[in-house]
Amino acid sequence: MIIIEDFIRSSYPLYTIQEFRIAFKMAVQGKLDCSTDHYEKFSPKFIGQVMVAYTKKANELRKMTKVITDDLPTPKLSDEEIVSFTQKEWLESPRIDFNKVFNADKVFEILIKQKKMAFQPEEMLEIVRAVRLDNQFKFNKMYGQDAKEFNKLIKDDKFVDTQCKKLALKRYFENLPS
């Protein structure tokens, strides 16, 4: 389940839970061009097939409808609002897994730019070590296809880089004065 959650968060960050519900409902109803046979294996591959078909269908529908939202100004969040949301989201969560830190790349970039976070080389190495240890621990508890997919994921530098940012943010948020 960890892999599936990571896959959804990283591959479909702009989709809402409601859109996932609609996508799977449409797939089961045969309204999407994808197979719903998952053979008792609810995997990232299966989710990806449904979401690719849903995205294709949603884009077709969007082209057919007149866009009314063009007239409305897009609300622009300030850097502080973005950081505050992610911080609140983390601090109010069960805080079990640093990988659940939301929007890590953007928040990390903001805090570095604002010079609210800075790292010594040994601190960066310690974070990388902690992420690798956590990944190894998770990997050792997996079997079969989950283990294969997670092994590919942890060899992806971008994925590990984001995990390191998430761990750094977790530590930053938890060490702020209340």
Image: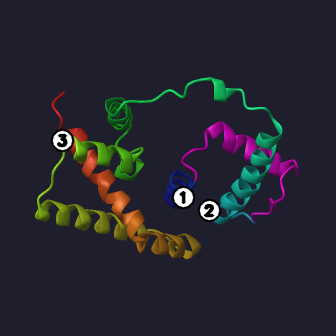
Closer to viewer: mark 3 or mark 1? 3
Which residue occupies 18% across, 46% down? 117
- Residue at numbered disc 2: 44
Looking at this rendering, what residue extends furthest in the right direction?
30
Which residue occupies 13% across, 64% down? 121
Magenta residues span: 12-38
User: Does the rendering let one see residue 97?
Assistant: no
- Is 2 situated left or right of 49 in this image? left
Mark sitting earlier along the chain (3/1): 1
Which residue occupies 76% across, 45% down? 58
- Residue at numbered disc 1: 7
Q: Amino acid at mark 2?
A: Pro
Mark sitting earlier along the chain (2/1): 1
Residue 150, x across and y down, in percent: 48, 69
- Residue at numbered disc 3: 116
**Quarter of the image containing the N terminus?**
bottom right
Q: Amino acid at mark 1?
A: Phe
Which residue occupies 48% across, 74% down? 152
- Is 117 situated left or right of 21 in this image? left
Element carrying mark 3: loop
Q: How many marks?
A: 3
Residue 164, x across and y down, in percent: 30, 59
Are the residues tagged 2 and 1 within 8 Å (C-beta)? Answer: yes
Mark sitting earlier along the chain (2/3): 2
Residue 101 against residue 44 in the figure, above or below: above
Instruction: Quote the CA–CA distance across marks 2 and 1.
Output: 6 Å
Q: Amino acid at mark 3?
A: Lys
